Structure formats: structure tokens, C-alpha cells
Image (tube, rainbow, N blue to C red):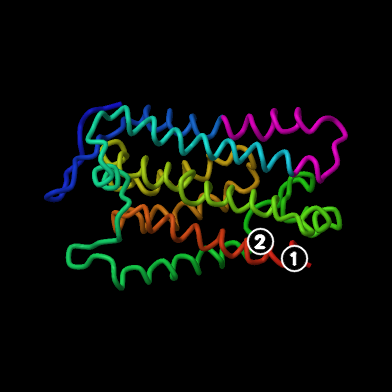
Amino acid sequence: MQTTTSPTQTGVPAIPQYSRGMVLAVWAAAAVPMAVLAWVVAPAIAGDGASSRRFFITLLSALTFGLLWQAVLVVILLLRERRDPSWTNVRDRLWLRPPQTASRRGGRLWWWVLVYALALAALDMLPFGPSGPDGRNFGHFLESSAGQATFHHAWWLYALVAFELFLNTVIGEELLFRGLLLPRMGKAFGRADWIVNGVLFGVYHLHEPWVIPNAIATGFLTAGPSKRYRSSLMGIAIHSVESVFFLVVLLPMVIS
């Protein structure tokens, strides 16, 4: 890891900058465990000839552990920086602050979350990229009789999905890619740092490679505003709208 720091505003701590090798190392530390959990660990635990119900629950549990590891990875990398451990300092180093421009902070800038979230929703509704194998397509599983029976009155499973989505869009993927990596990529990639961040986010999805085209576009829609407003909360909010919508759609299946 390079020890050079990015320019800062008055009162905002300097953020250490990563080399390209370090950026790729952090990417691999997130992507490889997820791929191994999805393609090796989950099938091994579920067993040969496992029912779709058993396999999807096992896969969901495995990926939840992978996302939890990403939250731990953020903590480890922050500790390696040996900076002030106070919440105020950590918040600033992870861009966990309201969106801001030269003349405005927060306020109406939050409305941009809705704009980008609608763009993300439109992206998800378009037939963008391959659908993936039926045996690993969570949407197809939910549409099947086995999927509906699995979630019927299964509040514990609904809670697991909610926890997985929380890790996915708050303290897992988004915090790692937009909170940790993006602020540290400026020296290595210059003004294209948010573009590279979006591509890395997409290619990170080795655990479900058929979504990579969609995930790259999602990465742009979250990294762009996060960089523009120097706020990882923008990316977290935009991505979380998608998660909340999914939970709302899933709820009738649980209570029916």
C-alpha cells in the first residue's frame, strides 16, 4: 500500500492512496472468497443431488458469510492505516458523510439518490445480459413452486435474505467498493477512478458471472455519484433502494 495521501479539505483527514496492485489485491480478497463459496463450498455442503430448496438456502448462507468477510476486510484495512480510530476520522476516511459540492452539503443533493435509483430500476427491468443457469437463478427459483413453498411463512429465511441484502448494500460490497476503495484509487487511476471502480465491481461478481454486464452498469450508477459528491452514502442509498424493493416484493410470498 502506498503511503501518499490525497488532497483534503480543511478539517478532513488525508486519505492514503493505493497502488494499482493494492487495488487489485483488495478486489481479489473480496472476489475470490465469494467465487469459492459459490462454486465449491455451497455445492459441497448441499451435496450431490440436493433439492433446489436445500441448494439455494446453502448458497444464500455461503454468500452471506462472504459478504460478512468483506465488512471485516474493511475494518482490517482501516486498522492497517494506523490513523485516528475515532468515529469522526473513520467516517471521513470512508466518505460516510452527506453528499456535498463546493456550495452545498446534503439537502437537495439527496434527491439525486432517487434519480440514480430509478435508473438502476430501469436497468434491472431491461433484458440486459444473460440470465444464468436455472439451477442458480434466484429469480427463477422464487417463481417456481419449490421456491414459493420454501418461503411460505419462513420468516427466518426472510430475515436471512434481509441480512444478506444489508451486508450487500450497506456494510459489505458498497462500503468496500465505494467507501474504502474509491477514495483510495485517485492517484492510481486519476479522473477515471470511478469508472475503474465500476468495472471492478462488475467483474467482482465471479460468483454469478452472468450478471457481470449488469453489475458493471450498477457500479457506474453508484460509483459515479459517490465520486461526484464525495459520499459513499450516495452509493449505499442508491443500491439499498433496490434491496428494499426486493424485500417488499418477497414479503407477500412469506405471509401468503
Q: Which of 52 and 229 is in front in this view?
A: 52
Residue 81: within the magenta? no
Looking at the figure, which quarter contains the C terminus?
bottom right
Disc 1 element: helix
Foreground: disc 2 or disc 1? 1
Question: Between disc 2 and disc 1, whose residue precedes?
Answer: 2
| Total numbered circles | 2
Amino acid at the residue labelled 1? Ile
Q: What element carries label 2?
A: loop
For residue 152, above or below residue 204:
below
Identify residue for label 2.
Answer: 127
Give how far apart the Cα atoms at labels 2 and 1 are: 29 Å
Identify the residue shown where x is 65% and y is 46%. 210
Image coordinates for residue 230, horizontal then vertical, percent: 29, 54
Q: Say whether residue 41 is magenta.
A: yes
Q: What stretch is highlighted in magenta?
A: 33-56
User: Does residue 143 sit above or below 164 in this rendering?
Assistant: below
